[in-house]
Amino acid sequence: MSEQLEMPSLDDRKKKILNLVIKNYLETGEPVGSRTVSKLLDNSLSSATIRNEMSDLEELGFIVQPHTSAGRVPSDMGYRFYVNELMQEHEKKVQEIQEFVVEKTEKMEKVLKKVVKTLAVNTNYATMITAPSTKRNKVKFIQLSALEEQQIVALIVMEGNIVKNKIIELDENIDNETVLKLNILLNTTLNGLTREEINLGVIAKMKEQSGGYSQLVSDVLDALAEAFTEDEDLQIYTSGATNLIKYPELADSETASALLGAFEDKDELAEFIAETNEELKDDGIVVTIGKESPIQTMQDCSVVTATYDLGDGLSGKIGIIGPKRMDYENVMNSLKNMKEQLDSTFKGKKERPTGKDE
Amino acid sequence: MSEQLEMPSLDDRKKKILNLVIKNYLETGEPVGSRTVSKLLDNSLSSATIRNEMSDLEELGFIVQPHTSAGRVPSDMGYRFYVNELMQEHEKKVQEIQEFVVEKTEKMEKVLKKVVKTLAVNTNYATMITAPSTKRNKVKFIQLSALEEQQIVALIVMEGNIVKNKIIELDENIDNETVLKLNILLNTTLNGLTREEINLGVIAKMKEQSGGYSQLVSDVLDALAEAFTEDEDLQIYTSGATNLIKYPELADSETASALLGAFEDKDELAEFIAETNEELKDDGIVVTIGKESPIQTMQDCSVVTATYDLGDGLSGKIGIIGPKRMDYENVMNSLKNMKEQLDSTFKGKKERPTGKDE
DNA sequence: TGTTAGCACTCTTTTGACTTGAGTGCTAAC
DNA sequence: GTTAGCACTCAAGTCAAAAGAGTGCTAACA
């Protein structure tokens, strides 16, 4: 995260003018001139007066001139001010989010894909969502089953009904009795532990307790440990990336390529998400504007993120990415909406989305 | 699929000239003039002669003039001719595909993602791969386990070690004995059946056989049937979509948006794949050029697809999408290469990629 | 003292005329 | 059948001029 300057305060008239400039720019994408603002004020002030005020606003750093004889455009700080203080949230036009129906028994993956797509369609920006991290999620059930003589399958169910599985290939035959013993051992030892708590120490202890079957048991436990730690590269689903190239300021093939590249290769997104430590504003929605973003390729964009919570320590993030002149009001409302819908669908109710392994 | 005209035959000199025009255009992306061709022939023919020949070639439909005073550009038919007859496959420059290492125990999803990404990086085009269809794949193992009083998890392993799971919520309590009975019933009835064979009839029969537990058993079986039929929307993984906007002829935001949109929304790709019924040429590689494609948004592209086969009836398709002036030789070689690598890694050997559910 | 009219100035964008260069088609000669 | 030569076409580049949008500054006004 980069700059986050302290902001000068403004008198009412300046606020009003800044507001108009930004609003107009959000709509048109064109620099806004003094005459336009004057008209928007019903000529209650002449363009000359506005010019003076805008000159001040530029000096204070809220707006910027692309070139000498152009109108003004909001700076990152201008947007920031707008989001923090100017933007009134008129809940009225709540703009119901459409087509979003999740059945409670659907797999997590499907739910996430639906959410992210619905948001993209509704906002016309790019969206992303992270699968809830299962690190702090507890093991609810483990079972090994022999498939063939040298092959067993492990089924792991976590709290919140996230299901994992792993096929384990062995070097020697395994008999049913051993499988049974292992199952008992696993369930007594691991049940109720979180993924974080299942480390090499626990594994070693189990190996010890299991006595005789050293090599075989050891193999199985190692494979299980792997299943627990593997693919905790948090999963990210995205949608609507192509919406971004509809905005001319992002459409040149240079920028677009970099931006969409970041989307395809989920790493950068992961980095972004990681750095977005919510400052826990009232509604948990965080807005990152332009250069405030830690990642290079998104410095011409704004990102709005929210944290959702499905209970059982299952929480993840939803994000909407658009041009800096994105419709913050609409986006923040949509996001809040979706968050509430998700929360209320899954929380409290006993039924939760069925997990998927992976 | 649209046009597939019968093609006029050409004398050797015309072939040679056509070849040069296309080759040159593939390299430069610029229309090729008569003088250029003359030079490429070491001036053994004057540009005037070439002009006459090119005029003929245009009349026959192999090449096209963007405008009166420009050089010539290959038509779809020209590319087709090139691919079918002109292109010599010099295996020498096999250009080893790099960084492709699959461990045999990795989950299918991971393997596919790796393949598709490797290909995209190596060719600099967009790539896609379909997960092997499991329709004709046989059930190897089924197991239900009670998680809570009204909740059970079903684990299904198919031949080829594809694993599926489903959490089933019940309306009444289920006891261990019932679960046990169900397990026996399921395994005796379903083992060895393919997904296609597990239809309502089989389910009805099982319900019948299970006697007393009607409602409960019925619920479970219905949920299982759902697990079998659900998400057979074949899965498609893609990579390198952004490579496409590096080619100027595809980069304008209109085209790019449509094209990348098709990539994001896997439906169109699925449609494409479905229509690509391999005409089983020698190597099973199919080239679709421009308007030959059934899908609108790809009519400025060419698509090269191959079918891979992992044994056990597990087969799917790999595709590479690029501009019409893509490097067909390289692409076809890479594809053949990858196909062979996949085949040899998984076939015959007993170890195959570990399945994933879903 | 804050507001406004007016004007000179700046810079981008548009337009149209002109030039250049690549390439063609045709004809006549070899 | 091949080639040289020439007239013609068209896209793309260059240039200057004009238009338009907007600013900053100054002087006058209430």
Image (cartoon, coloured by chain):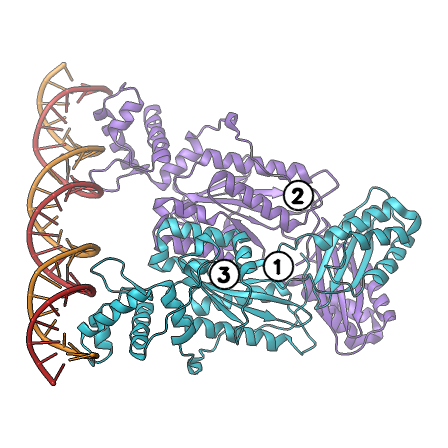
Chain colours: A cyan, B purple, C orange, D red
Indicate the position of residue A57 as horizontal and vertical percent values: 29, 68
Indicate the position of residue B6 as horizontal and vertical percent values: 39, 39
Q: Nearer the viewer, residue B105 or B80?
A: B105
Classify the position of the C terminus of chain B by image quarter: bottom right
Q: Are marks 1 and 2 in contact (CB under 8 Å)?
A: no
Name the residue that disc number 2 marks.
B310
Label 2, secondary structure: give it.
Answer: loop
In this rendering, which labeled residue sits more in front, label 3 or label 2? Answer: 3
Q: Chain of mark 3?
A: A
Indicate the position of residue B337 as horizontal and vertical percent values: 57, 35
Marker disc for residue B313: none
Q: Chain of mark 1?
A: B
Q: Are marks 1 and 3 in contact (CB under 8 Å)?
A: no
Marker disc for residue A239: 3
Residue A95, by quadrant, is: bottom left
In-image side of B344 versus A152 (left or right): left
Q: Is residue B200 above or below residue D3?
A: below
At a point 31% along the width and 72% down the height, the residue shown is A18
Indicate the position of residue A91 as horizontal and vertical percent values: 44, 81
Q: Nearer the viewer, residue B195 or B37?
A: B37
At a point 74% along the width and 42% down the height, the residue shown is B351
Marker disc for residue B232: 1
In-image side of A162 versus A23 (left or right): right
Q: Nearer the viewer, residue B138 or B27?
A: B27
Q: Earlier in the sequence, mark 1 or mark 2?
A: 1
Q: Could you tell me if residue B279 is visible in this image? A: no
Q: Could you tell me if residue A197 is visible in this image? A: yes
Mark 3 → mark 2, Cα distance in angstroms: 31 Å
